[in-house]
Image (cartoon, rainbow, N blue to C red):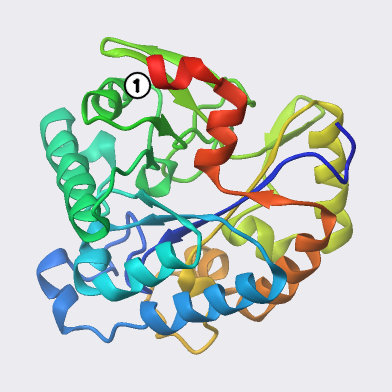
Amino acid sequence: MTFETSQNLLTVDVEDWFHILDSSAVPPLERWEELESRVAANVERILAMLDHKGVKGTFFWLGWVAQRHKSLVRACHAAGHEIASHGHDHVLAYQVGERKFLDDIVRAKAMLEDILGQSVKGFRAPGFGITEGAEWAFDVIKRAGYNYDSSVFPATRGHGGLADAQRGPHWIETQEGRLAEIPQSVVSLANRRFSLFGGGYLRLAPLPLIRWGIRRLRRSGQPLVIYIHPREVDPAQPRLALGYKRSFKCYVNLESTLPKLETLFNIGRFMRMDEYAKAFFGEDLQAA
């Protein structure tokens, strides 16, 4: 594969500004209804940019958000983007345990399918929150009926990450059968893995460094998987009292997200994750 023709995937984890994980500063679930929602305007900004650039992507919708913005879910689907699941209540698997995690992701899948009138194939855990000791989550994802997963962050990170996981797309053997996995993109340098391609990593990294990372991916035969959140295109969003380190990660360079994406969209064709999964795993994906 050449740099220009290699496959690129844009993914959007559809959450609101207050859906930040693992902080006491984040309002609890029972208070979310009281808060100003900014997700619709931000998703519409992203959709407009993608339409302008002719890019199709995969939107991993949080069920709690989808339930309140059904027409936007349908508009996203009508624009040609894949609708996938990000769970319902934005829970970390290793915090809530197997039963609650299963209930949450089954509920999200059913809700999205009811909105769309068709099956939902893909899943991504909030925060890439599958860690060592919580690999049972892959059994649960397969049991819930998802066709492929994109929850693996094959490096260390704040509330997720499997540092020794395979970096490229691969099969995961679960108690329920094989699960197709498309991990988040990371690069390796001096035996250390790190990401440049999503969230705060994308906003903090200068474009020359991101391009360097993409070339490293190409040489290792990996696809480029980018992820963003709608709040990352919203410099005017309310700020949570997260502390210096988390605030820096969550709020720095918000104005850079859309310009960086517009530049990166020039590197080659972008495709939906379900399309990539079908092309990479072939007929085995349907049989698994």
Q: Is residue 37 above or below residue 102?
A: below
Classify residue 183 by image quadrant: top right
Q: Position of residue 126 (x, y in %)?
A: 36, 48
The residue carrying pointer 1 sits among few (fewer than 14), some (14 to 19) or many (20 or more) residues within 10 Å by Cα, namely some
Residue 169 appears anywhere in the view: no
Count of numbered circles on the image? 1
Is 47 left, or right, of 253 in this rendering? left
Q: Secondary structure at mark 1?
A: loop
Q: Position of residue 158 (x, y in %)?
A: 47, 46
Q: Position of residue 79 (x, y in %)?
A: 49, 67
Identity, as a three-letter code, of the amino acid under mark 1: Glu
Judging by the rendered image, the residue that carries numbered circle 1 is: 135
Q: Is residue 70 above or below residue 188?
A: below
Is 246 left, or right, of 208 in this rendering? left
Query: In what quadrant of the picture does the C terminus appear?
Result: top left
Q: Is residue 75 above or below residue 249?
A: below
Which residue appears at 40% of the width and 23% of the height? 132
Which residue appears at 23% of the width and 45% of the height? 109
Which residue appears at 24% of the width and 26% of the height? 140
Is 205 left, or right, of 209 in this rendering? left
Q: Position of residue 159 (x, y in %)?
A: 41, 44
